[in-house]
């Protein structure tokens, strides 16, 4: 039996009187594309925050390829192979696209402690950053400042920063949000091109793209798992309609 | 290295060398020396404010404690200058490592309040622990010692030493600014959560910056003691921390030239005003309000963007 | 035995004094997120105003109230003229309030000179009180009573009145408060008035113990900070408990190790920071 890439067991977290996550158990196999759906406030991003280690759960555990990381700090999880993009863009707007990716590379490769020598002279890092940017079709934009790029380019930069770190498990929080139809198509192709040795968990409201992309789907509501299954199973299940139409 | 960079450094060296030629009197050279020492101090605080994005109101600790260490070790313990300087620098830096752990339990306003409170602890200790510090009377250094064979008693020789140290500080901080560590530090300033999601240890990066700031502050503190040949609780006081903060903000936080420009302006104003009126604190307070209201980004970035506007 | 009883009573009185000092600071910081570093200066200004009014033979309580109102109005002006434009710019707020405190200190020095000005307690409250056979300065118990009364009134104001409900709503969600028709700028003025009023009032009530002197502001501001950090930023019960802890440490510290009393004051703050950075009663901020 293969070890799941990401295994969440009985995860629970309360903020004051509000239960953000209630006994969530999700198991994602290596190479799988898993889609998280649910209405606004269902706890999807909060679940990502917990997987990333922004805060620790009250109960339950999170394992990456069998290794328990429930109480590990975010940076250690990243070094273990976890990557993430944000729904609300969190980039370094005054710096170049290349510099943004270099910061990502320094995070996983180390070398961020050197206080000598100009960072711009690190050819190795610049080349790897440019390669990551080329992967998302931003090769020509590497030297531009983030503040001078379009929203669609910034979304792709988010993806480049995550991919540059060679994650084993990648959390994508609405990578298509706010994009035009043409840009959505570009990103859809990029997502399809991510090799299968990367496991992907996706939050996305664009159902056309997301349903085609996902192997399995988990439906969340009020911080708990309502149901889980294949595309066809989830679509056919009456509970899906109930959650979305508030029946 | 391109021509503009070489030209910039040449200009700095020339400016430093021109001062003794233009202002040969010991009095004016003395004022220039004060200004350069505070330039080093403001540069050290700028690591926190400009690069790490953390406002400290307790930075005078790293000016005052090494200054007291130099005075006490020289006068009370009779130590030689070299070990005295080394121990004073170590003490200031070690204290910044300790206080950094406490202050970095919080961020933003919490950080500011903790640094302020810790600064007051040291001020209170200097003021009340009369047996060690001489209390309000402070400690007087009988003479400026010779350092490694250099006689520092004349205004010119001390000015040269301070200039060299300032150049070293500028050079290291310029390197720091461009280095991988400088980039990571600015990353933690702009997007701390993202930086940890990229695998960086945000806390450790900030702590290292705090210690670096403490080290360069201590360098300024040692020079301060040699300069005034006197140290009192004033060196550890809240107004001293606030003045340094004003220097950084006036000149432009996050730039290399800003703190130097700010330190020179404030020192000159302070010296000139103090000799005419004794309302320095009112003027200082007013300067705070004017700087924040009129040029929140500081002189250097303000002038730079104005020049760019003209050229374009 | 006498030592312990007298020092305990002194500690309670000092705790009351510290609460009068720090309640206003905690209020402004907790509700408006503005670090008002001029708070020590406002406290000192209150003490000087009180000393002046008392010198003119005014009734003590009237002098305290008038000084409080005058300082409160100054606070309203500060907020409206200088601070409102700096919303969200914490560093700017810090620099401006610090600048104001320097100006207040300098102008007080110019106006009232460098010698301490005593404030006499009301004559009827001066005689010592005998507790268990020990004489104890009666006025200190009055300070304690004032602090407890202020604590109760503040709690009632914030939790039980319409204004209090509006203040809490405005602080929790400014946009929402605007949406339901609350004038947020007026609320800010109200909170600033209240905080500065408490500083001025505290300066006069504490006056007979501390007197008004140059440097009172710099002595008091760190104490307010320590109380607030210890108790938890923005928590009124925290400020109350923090005040009594610091009051006790200050008194017993000064009596037992006079050289280190000032340093010892900060130890509980350091301890709390290491163990529970949000303070004893604090919520997580940001």
Image (cartoon, grey):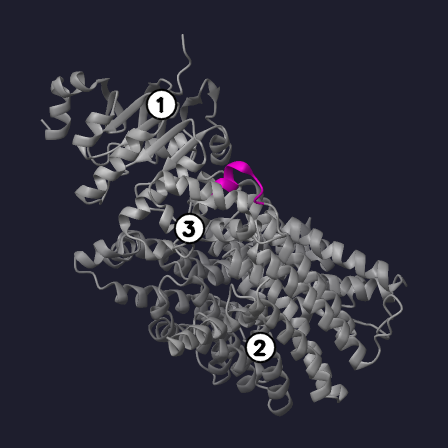
Residue A196 is marked as 1
Q: State which quadrant residue A31 falls in.
A: top left
Residue B301 is marked as none
Q: What range of the chain is rendered magenta? A: A104-112
Figure check: A63 above or below C72: above
> B47 and A157: which one is in front?
A157
Residue at 53 percent of width and 64 percent of height? C221
> C198 and A165: which one is in front?
A165
Question: Could you give the CA–CA distance between mark 2 and mark 1, rounded to whole angstroms?
Answer: 81 Å
Q: Residues within 10 Å of mark 1 (few under 14, many from 20)?
A: few
Figure check: C88 above or below B151: above
Q: Is residue A111 magenta?
A: yes
Residues behind callouts 1 and 3 on a single chain: no
Q: Residues within 10 Å of mark 3 (few under 14, many from 20)?
A: many
Query: Looking at the magenta stretch, what is its main secondary structure?
Result: helix
Asked if the residue at tag 1 contacts the one at tag 2, i.e. Cβ–Cβ closer than 8 Å, the answer is no
Residue at 27 percent of width and 66 percent of height? C185
Residue at 22 percent of width and 64 percent of height? C183
Residue C235 is marked as 3
Image quarter (top left, top right, bottom left or bottom right) of the C terminus of chain A: top left
Q: Is residue C35 magenta?
A: no
> Please, which chain is the residue tagged with disc 3 on?
C
Residue at 46 percent of width and 50 percent of height? A99
Instruction: Say whether residue B106 is left or right of residue B229.
Output: left
Report the residue marked by disc 2: C118
Figure check: B309 above or below B51: below
In the rendered image, residue C82, in percent from the top left (x then y), is placed at 38, 74
């Amino acid at each position: 039996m293969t070890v799941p890439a990401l295994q969440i067991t009985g995860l629970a977290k309360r903020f004051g009187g509000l239960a953000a996550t209630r006994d969530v158990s999700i198991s994602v196999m290596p190479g799988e594309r898993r889609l998280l759906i649910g209405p606004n406030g269902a706890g999807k991003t909060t679940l990502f925050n917990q997987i990333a280690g922004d805060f620790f759960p009250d109960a339950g555990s999170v394992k990456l390829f069998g290794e328990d990381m429930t109480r590990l700090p975010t940076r250690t999880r990243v070094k273990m192979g976890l990557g993430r993009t944000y729904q609300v863009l969190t980039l370094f707007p005054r710096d170049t696209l290349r510099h943004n990716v270099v910061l990502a590379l320094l995070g996983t490769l180390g070398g961020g402690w050197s206080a000598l020598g100009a960072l711009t002279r690190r050819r190795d890092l610049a080349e790897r950053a440019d390669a990551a940017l080329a992967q998302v079709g931003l090769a020509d934009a590497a030297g531009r400042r983030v503040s001078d790029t379009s929203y669609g380019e910034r979304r792709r930069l988010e993806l480049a920063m995550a991919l540059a770190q060679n994650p084993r498990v990648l959390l994508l929080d609405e990578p298509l949000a706010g994009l035009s139809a043409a840009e959505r198509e570009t990103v859809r192709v990029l997502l399809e091109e991510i090799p299968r040795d990367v496991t992907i968990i996706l939050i996305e409201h664009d159902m056309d793209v997301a349903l085609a992309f996902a192997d399995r789907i988990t439906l969340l509501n009020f911080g708990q798992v309502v149901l889980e299954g294949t595309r066809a199973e989830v679509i056919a299940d009456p509970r899906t309609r109930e959650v979305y139409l508030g029946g | 290295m391109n021509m503009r960079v070489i030209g910039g450094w040449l200009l700095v060296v020339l400016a430093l060398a021109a001062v003794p030629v233009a202002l040969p009197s010991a009095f004016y050279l003395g004022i220039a020396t004060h200004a350069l020492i505070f330039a080093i101090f403001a540069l050290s605080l700028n690591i926190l404010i400009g690069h790490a994005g953390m406002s400290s109101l307790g930075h005078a600790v790293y000016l005052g404690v090494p200054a007291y260490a130099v005075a006490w070790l020289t006068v009370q313990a009779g130590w030689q200058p070299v070990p005295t300087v080394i121990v004073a620098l170590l003490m200031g830096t070690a204290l910044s490592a300790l206080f950094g752990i406490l202050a970095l339990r919080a961020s933003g306003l919490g950080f500011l309040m903790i640094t302020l409170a810790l600064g007051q602890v040291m001020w209170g200790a200097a003021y009340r622990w009369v047996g060690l510090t001489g209390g309000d009377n402070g400690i007087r250094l009988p003479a400026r010692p010779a350092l490694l064979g250099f006689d520092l008693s004349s205004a010119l020789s001390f000015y040269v030493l301070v200039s060299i140290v300032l150049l070293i500080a500028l050079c290291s901080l310029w390197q720091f600014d461009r280095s991988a560590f400088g980039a990571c530090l600015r990353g933690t300033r702009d997007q701390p959560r993202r930086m940890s999601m990229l695998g960086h240890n945000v806390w450790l990066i900030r702590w290292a910056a705090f210690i670096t700031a403490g080290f360069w502050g201590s360098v300024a503190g040692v020079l301060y003691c040699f300069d005034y040949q006197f140290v009192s609780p004033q060196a550890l006081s809240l107004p001293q921390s606030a003045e340094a903060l004003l220097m950084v903000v006036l000149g432009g936080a996050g730039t290399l030239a800003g703190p130097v420009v700010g330190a020179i302006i404030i020192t000159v104003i302070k010296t000139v005003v103090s000799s005419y009126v004794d309302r320095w604190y009112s003027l200082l307070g007013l300067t705070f309000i004017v700087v924040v209201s009129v040029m929140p980004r500081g002189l250097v970035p303000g002038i730079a963007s104005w020049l760019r506007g003209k050229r374009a | 035995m006498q030592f312990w009883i007298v020092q305990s009573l002194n500690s309670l009185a000092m705790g009351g004094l510290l609460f009068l000092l720090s309640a206003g600071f905690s209020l402004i910081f907790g509700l408006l997120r503005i670090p008002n570093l001029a708070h020590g200066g406002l406290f000192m200004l209150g003490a000087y105003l009180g000393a002046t009014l008392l010198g003119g033979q005014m009734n003590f309580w009237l002098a305290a109230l008038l000084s409080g109102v005058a300082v409160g109005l100054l606070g309203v002006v500060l907020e409206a003229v200088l601070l409102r434009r700096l919303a969200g710019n914490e560093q700017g707020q810090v620099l401006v309030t610090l600048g104001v405190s320097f100006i207040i200190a300098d102008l007080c020095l110019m106006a009232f000179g460098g010698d301490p000005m005593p404030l006499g307690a009301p004559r009827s409250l001066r005689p010592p009180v005998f507790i268990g056979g020990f004489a104890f300065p009666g006025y200190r118990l009055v300070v304690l009573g004032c602090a407890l009364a202020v604590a109760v009134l503040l709690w009632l104001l914030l939790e039980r009145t319409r204004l209090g409900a509006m203040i809490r709503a405005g602080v929790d969600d400014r946009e929402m408060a605007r949406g339901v028709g609350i004038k947020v700028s007026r609320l800010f003025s109200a909170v600033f008035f209240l905080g500065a009023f408490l500083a001025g009032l505290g300066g006069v009530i504490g006056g007979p113990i501390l007197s008004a002197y140059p440097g009172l502001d710099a002595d008091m501001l760190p104490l307010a900070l320590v109380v607030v950090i210890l108790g938890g930023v923005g928590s009124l019960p925290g400020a109350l408990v923090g005040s009594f802890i610091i009051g006790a440490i200050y008194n017993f510290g000064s009596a037992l190790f006079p050289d280190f009393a000032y340093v010892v004051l900060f130890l509980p703050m350091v301890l709390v920071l290491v163990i529970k950075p949000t303070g004893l009663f604090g919520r997580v901020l940001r």
